C-alpha cells in the first residue's frame, strides 16, 4: 500500500487496478491487460490516449516557456489566444475568461465573481444560488456545497447555509414523477416548485441558478422536453442569472459544441469549462462570464488596487498551449460532428438493453449515457445500496471494459470522442457479458430493494 490518500475512493478498497499506459481508446494495467476506457478517464480524455500532437505541443511549450503567471499585469500570448478562441466558441455574450485548474475551482471562482459583481452594482444581498437535488458541481468547499449528492457532503460540515445555497428538484422523470404523471405534468410541477422557492426566498436575494445541461455523476439525467424553456422563463422573470456547468458536457460530448446547445439553454450568463478543454492532458479550467458582469468589476478592482482572486497556475502556459491545440483538432477534424454520428450509434446500441430484466432506464445524448439497474423492473424500485452497481463495474473490468457506477446502480458510458463504431460494438459486447454476470450475482445473493 502506498501513502496516497485516494480521491473518491473507499479507503478499505484502494489500489485495485494500476493503470500503466494508454493508447487511443484503450488503457493497459500493470499486468498488460487491455481495457476499453468507456468513461474517457473521468469524462475527460476526449481525444483518447497517446495523441502525439498534444504530447509534442506540451513539450514544445515547455521548451519555450514552461511557466509564467498572470498576476499584476503579466500575461503571455498562448493564454490570450486560448481566451479569444473560447470567446468565439461559447454562447456567452461578449465572454470574458478566467483560467483555473479544475472544474471545482472554476465553480468556486464563479461564486466569488457573483458576489463581487453584485456588490459592485450595489446589490450585495443578491447572493443566494439555486442548485438542484442530485447535482454535482465539484468537491472544493464551495463547489461541494453546490453539489447535491450526500456522499460529497456527509461528514464535511460544509457551509451550505452560509453560502446561501438553495435546492430545487432534480429533473429526472423516471425517479421523480408522481403516479400517473406525464412528462409535461412533471415539468410543470417541478418548475412551479422552482418559482415558489424563488418567491419564498425573495428574488432580490437570488443571484443565479446552476445546472449541468445533462448531468454526469448524478446519473446522466436528461431533463424532459420543455424543462429548460420553462426554467429560463422563470429566471428571466425574476432577474436571476443562468449558470451552465459544462465541465462534462462541453466540447462535443452531447453531439453539439456545448450541452447548452443540445438542450436549448440560450445565452447563459456564466459557463464552467474543464475536462475536455484540454482532453485532460493538462489540468485547466475556465470560468466564463458575460462581458457586462466583467465591466462592472473594473472600477471596484481599481479602487482596491487589485482584483484579489487568482491561482498560481491560472493560465499556465503549457496547459493553455495544449488546450489551444485541442481546440484546433476539434475544428480541423470535425470532432463534434463525428461525435454526433457516433453518439447516435451509441444511443441505439444502449437502447438494446431496455428490455433486460435488471434495467430500469436507459438514457443519454451523444456520447454520454447511462443504464440504470433496478431491483424491480415493474416498479422501478432501486437497490437498497450501491453493491449491485459496484459489482457490475467490477464485472465490466473483468471483461476488459472500464465504466463507472454512479448514483447507486447506474452504469455510466462516456467514451473518448474518437471512438469508432467497431469499438462501440466491442464496448456493448463487453457490457452485455458484465450485465449477465450481474444478473447471476443478483439472483445468487437475492439482492432486493
Image (cartoon, helix red, strand yellow):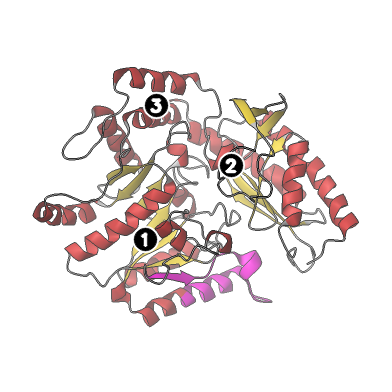
Relative image position of residue 379 (x, y in whole percent)? 77, 69
Q: Closer to us: mark 3 or mark 2?
A: 3
- Residue ID at (33%, 55%): 110
Segment tinted magenta in the rendering = 164-193
SS state under label 3? helix
SS state under label 1? strand
Relative image position of residue 32 (x, y in whole percent)? 71, 23
- Residue ID at (56%, 27%): 49
Residue identifier under label 3: 325
Residue identifier under label 1: 242
**How many residues crowd mark 3 within 10 Å: few (<14), some (14–19), many (20+)?**
many
- Residue ID at (37%, 67%): 163
Evaluate whether residue 267 shows in this view.
no
Could you tell whether 152 is left or right of 424 in the image? left
- In three-dimensional space, the C-alpha distance between marks 3 and 2, rounded to whole angstroms, equals 22 Å
> Reading the chain from its start, which is encountered first: label 3 or label 2?
3
Residue identifier under label 2: 367
> Reading the chain from its start, which is encountered first: label 1 or label 3?
1
Amino acid at each position: 500500500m502506498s501513502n496516497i490518500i485516494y480521491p473518491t475512493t473507499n479507503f478499505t478498497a484502494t489500489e485495485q487496478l494500476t493503470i500503466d499506459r494508454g493508447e487511443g481508446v484503450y488503457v493497459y494495467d500493470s499486468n498488460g491487460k487491455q481495457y476499453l476506457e468507456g468513461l474517457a478517464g473521468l469524462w475527460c480524455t476526449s481525444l483518447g490516449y497517446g495523441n502525439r500532437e498534444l504530447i509534442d505541443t506540451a513539450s514544445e511549450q515547455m521548451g519555450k516557456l514552461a511557466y509564467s503567471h498572470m498576476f499584476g499585469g503579466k500575461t503571455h500570448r498562448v493564454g490570450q489566444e486560448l481566451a479569444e478562441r473560447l470567446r468565439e466558441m461559447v454562447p456567452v455574450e461578449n465572454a470574458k475568461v478566467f483560467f483555473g485548474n479544475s472544474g471545482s475551482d472554476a465553480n468556486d471562482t464563479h461564486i466569488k465573481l457573483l458576489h463581487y459583481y453584485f456588490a459592485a452594482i450595489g446589490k450585495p444581498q443578491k447572493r443566494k444560488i439555486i442548485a438542484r437535488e442530485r447535482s454535482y458541481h465539484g468537491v472544493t468547499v464551495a463547489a461541494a456545497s453546490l453539489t447535491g449528492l450526500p456522499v460529497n457532503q456527509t461528514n464535511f460540515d460544509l457551509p451550505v447555509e452560509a453560502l446561501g445555497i438553495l435546492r430545487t428538484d432534480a429533473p429526472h422523470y423516471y425517479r421523480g414523477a408522481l403516479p400517473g404523471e406525464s412528462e409535461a405534468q412533471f415539468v410543470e410541477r417541478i418548475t412551479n416548485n422552482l418559482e415558489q422557492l424563488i418567491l419564498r426566498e425573495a428574488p432580490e436575494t437570488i443571484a443565479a441558478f446552476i445546472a449541468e445541461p445533462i448531468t454526469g455523476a448524478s446519473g446522466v439525467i436528461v431533463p424532459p422536453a420543455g424543462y429548460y424553456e420553462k426554467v429560463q422563463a422563470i429566471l428571466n422573470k425574476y432577474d436571476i442569472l443562468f449558470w451552465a456547468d459544462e465541465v462534462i458536457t462541453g466540447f462535443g460530448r452531447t453531439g453539439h459544441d456545448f450541452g447548452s446547445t443540445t438542450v436549448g439553454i440560450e445565452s447563459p450568463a456564466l459557463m464552467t469549462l474543464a475536462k475536455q478543454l484540454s482532453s485532460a492532458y493538462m489540468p485547466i479550467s475556465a470560468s466564463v462570464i458575460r462581458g457586462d458582469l466583467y465591466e462592472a468589476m473594473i472600477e471596484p478592482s481599481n479602487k482596491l488596487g487589485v482584483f484579489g482572486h487568482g491561482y498560481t497556475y491560472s493560465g499556465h502556459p503549457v496547459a493553455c498551449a495544449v488546450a489551444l491545440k485541442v481546440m484546433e483538432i476539434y475544428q480541423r477534424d470535425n470532432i463534434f460532428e463525428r461525435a454526433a454520428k457516433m453518439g447516435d450509434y451509441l444511443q441505439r446500441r444502449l437502447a438494446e438493453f431496455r428490455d433486460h430484466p435488471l434495467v430500469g432506464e436507459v438514457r443519454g445524448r451523444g456520447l454520454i449515457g447511462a443504464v440504470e439497474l433496478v431491483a424491480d423492473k415493474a416498479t422501478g424500485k432501486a437497490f437498497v445500496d450501491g453493491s449491485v452497481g459496484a459489482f457490475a463495474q467490477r464485472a465490466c473490468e473483468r471483461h476488459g471494459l472500464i465504466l463507472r457506477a454512479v448514483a447507486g446502480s447506474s452504469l455510466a458510458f462516456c467514451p473518448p470522442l474518437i471512438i469508432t463504431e467497431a469499438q462501440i460494438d466491442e464496448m456493448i459486447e463487453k457490457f452485455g457479458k458484465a450485465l449477465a454476470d450481474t444478473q447471476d450475482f443478483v439472483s445468487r445473493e437475492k439482492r432486493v430493494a
